[in-house]
Image (cartoon, grey):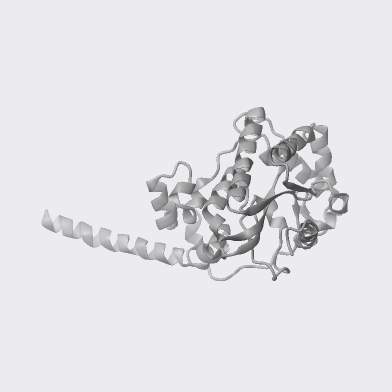
């Protein structure tokens, strides 16, 4: 029996050690430390003067040209209001007094209640800021990420291979139509699992209200923003009678918080008709981001929120 155990250990122990070594390498690989969206939370600055929350629409804010301000982009792809709140809750003390926080109000975050992918938040949020926190998920996604996804093995030894992304500036009619169909069907879909009508409306109002209330508590100035959308996509939403609900959402917030500023560029003709500023019907490219951010900066200065 003793010999058998020794033989088993002689095979199993090296294998276990190998897995630990591979996990260590993976956690220190370029992919895990730099390339993932979440890796930016390793470098959240102090005394933030300007920041934004949001989903992929938060990519519309490009602060690099404005080095005079300490800024940070807290957005993650497909992030919903409730996790915008938890992120702010964790990092609110990193803000300077009277800092400005831009809160994107996007079409898909009005009446839908979707299950958030909690897994990515284990890598940077504290336990109190992850609803339904589970110890085994913490171990998997925080301590042993090597085993968290099927495709991690091919990224194990990823070096610095980040490629420059060429912004999309021209779009064929067919491409635009296909993308408009995609977003319209996705965001206007009647999937009862996520589309909750008035229940979803109130759920998202409550989530944004939590963000605004926390801002006021922490001496942060909240500003609501809707980023530019191509006119052809807006036409689809207009035909679906969506905008009555959309503007009821922002009206409720403006009535509840009478001093709050709402910068609505969702259907601004300067952007919506200029397709060269977009990567797709719902997202700006780098040229659009630079133009839009410069406009937002001017709007904030005109409102005496930035000096």
Residues 126 and 272: in front is 126
How many numbered tags mark residues here?
A: 0
Residue 273 sits above or below residue 114 on the image: below
Q: Is residue 80 visible?
A: no
Q: Is residue 116 visible?
A: yes
Where residue 25 sits, quadrant-wise, is bottom left
Q: Position of residue 3 (x, y in %)?
A: 13, 58
Residues 126 and 224: in front is 224
The quadrant of the image that shows the C terminus is: bottom right
Residues 67 and 173: in front is 67
- Relative side of 134 to 62, left or right: left
- Relative side of 211 to 27, left or right: right
Residues 27 and 174: in front is 27
Q: Position of residue 200 (x, y in %)?
A: 63, 32
Q: Residue at x 76, y 46 (%)?
A: 179
- Relative side of 300 to 26, left or right: right
Where residue 245 sits, quadrant-wise, is top right
Residue 28 sits above or below residue 122 on the image: below
Residue 155 sits above or below residue 242 on the image: below
Q: Residue at x 56, y 65 (%)?
A: 46
Residue extending farthest left? 1
Residue 19 sits above or below residue 116 on the image: below
Q: Position of residue 89 (x, y in %)?
A: 54, 50
Q: Position of residue 113 (x, y in %)?
A: 60, 36
């Amino acid at each position: 029996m003793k010999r058998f155990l020794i033989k088993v250990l002689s095979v199993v122990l090296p294998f276990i050690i190998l897995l630990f070594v591979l996990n260590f390498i993976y956690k220190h690989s370029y992919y895990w430390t730099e390339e993932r969206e979440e890796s930016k939370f390793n470098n959240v600055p102090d005394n933030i003067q300007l920041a934004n929350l949001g989903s992929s629409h938060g990519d519309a804010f490009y602060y690099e040209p404005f080095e005079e301000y300490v800024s940070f982009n807290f957005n993650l792809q497909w992030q919903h209001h409730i996790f915008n709140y938890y992120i702010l809750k964790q990092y609110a003390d990193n803000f300077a007094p009277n800092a400005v926080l831009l809160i994107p109000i996007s079409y898909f975050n009005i009446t839908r209640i979707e299950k958030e992918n909690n897994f990515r938040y284990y890598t940077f949020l504290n336990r109190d800021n992850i609803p339904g926190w589970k110890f085994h998920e913490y171990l998997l996604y925080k301590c042993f990420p090597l085993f968290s996804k099927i495709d991690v093995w091919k990224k194990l030894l990823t070096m610095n291979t980040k490629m420059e992304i060429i912004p999309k500036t021209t779009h064929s009619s067919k491409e635009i139509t296909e993308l408009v169909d995609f977003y319209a069907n996705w965001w206007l879909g009647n999937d009862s699992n996520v589309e909750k009508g008035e229940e979803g409306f109130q759920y998202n109002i409550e989530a944004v209200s939590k963000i605004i209330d926390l801002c006021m508590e922490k001496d942060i100035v909240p500003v609501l923003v809707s980023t530019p959308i191509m006119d052809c996509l807006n036409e689809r939403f207009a035909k679906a009678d969506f905008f009555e609900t959309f503007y009821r959402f922002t009206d409720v917030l403006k009535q509840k918080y009478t001093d709050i500023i709402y910068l609505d560029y969702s259907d601004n003709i300067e952007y919506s008709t200029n397709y060269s500023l977009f990567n797709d019907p719902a997202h700006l490219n780098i040229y659009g981001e630079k133009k839009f951010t410069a406009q937002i900066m001017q709007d904030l200065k005109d409102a005496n929120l930035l000096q």
